[in-house]
Amino acid sequence: MRFSAYAVPSPTFDPKTHLMPDFKFETQAGAYQGRNICGVDEAGRGPLAGPVIAAAVILSPEHIPDGLNDSKALSHSARERLLNILVQKAKIGIGISEPGEIDRINILWASMTAMRRAVENIGISVDYALIDGNRVPPNMPCDAHAIVKGDAKSLSIAAASIVAKVTRDRIMTESDSRFPGYGWAGHKGYPTKAHRAAIETLGRSAAHRWTFGRKS
């Protein structure tokens, strides 16, 4: 398969028919030939508050955790268990875009920026990046390939989805004590009925986004 910056079409995620991701894309990109292939995903595009968090993960072909899957298909305890293994066995980079930046450049480009930062922060030179979604972030430090629903297809992207999800959940839980009353420990900043009611009562905090809904 020849890689490019164009996305590979994919069916909509359905837990009932979801197949486990595999290492095919990484193998084709040279993971077994000593090339550093990372998967990249983000968490937090939909919330009303908090940052967008992206993760880049390089898996060792010899140390792929059992049960590794798209974060959406895993329980909280399974994500936590897998993150603990990934921290020990994989190379990980984190990229963050805070609410102020999200408001300034919009959520789409903030997500793209966080993904690029994650790859830059991985700590070693990356030869190729597999990006979840339908576009490659601009100014990437390496060649890259976008894969629609990549977290359900690529083990490296699945790993990145877990790291991004758990990292952001932890940030929002910690922020709950700094901004009490909004219930972030429970809904992690997403637009639940309770969260919207809290905003009506308390107003927006410094961690809220003012431009929610502006996609591009």
Image: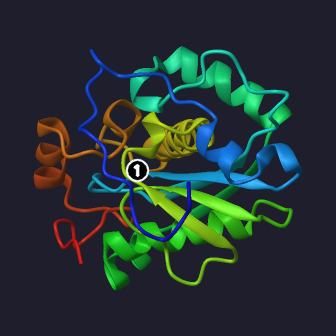
Residue 12 appears left or right of 122: left
Quadrant in the rendering for residue 2 = bottom right
Q: Circle 1 — which element?
A: loop
Mark 1 surroundings within 10 Å by alpha-carbon count, few (fewer than 14), some (14 through 19), many (20 or more)? some
Of residues 113 and 32, the one nearer the viewer is 32
- Residue labelled with disc 1: 179
- Residue 215, x across and y down, in percent: 22, 71
Q: As shown in the figure, which amino acid type bears the numbered disc 1?
A: Phe
- Residue 113, x across and y down, in percent: 51, 74
The answer to whether residue 100 is above or below residue 88 is below
Residue 52 appears left or right of 105: right
Quadrant of the image containing the N terminus = bottom right
Quadrant of the image containing the C terminus = bottom left
Of residues 98 and 67, the one nearer the viewer is 67
The residue located at (84%, 33%) in the rendering is 89
Of residues 214 and 193, the one nearer the viewer is 214
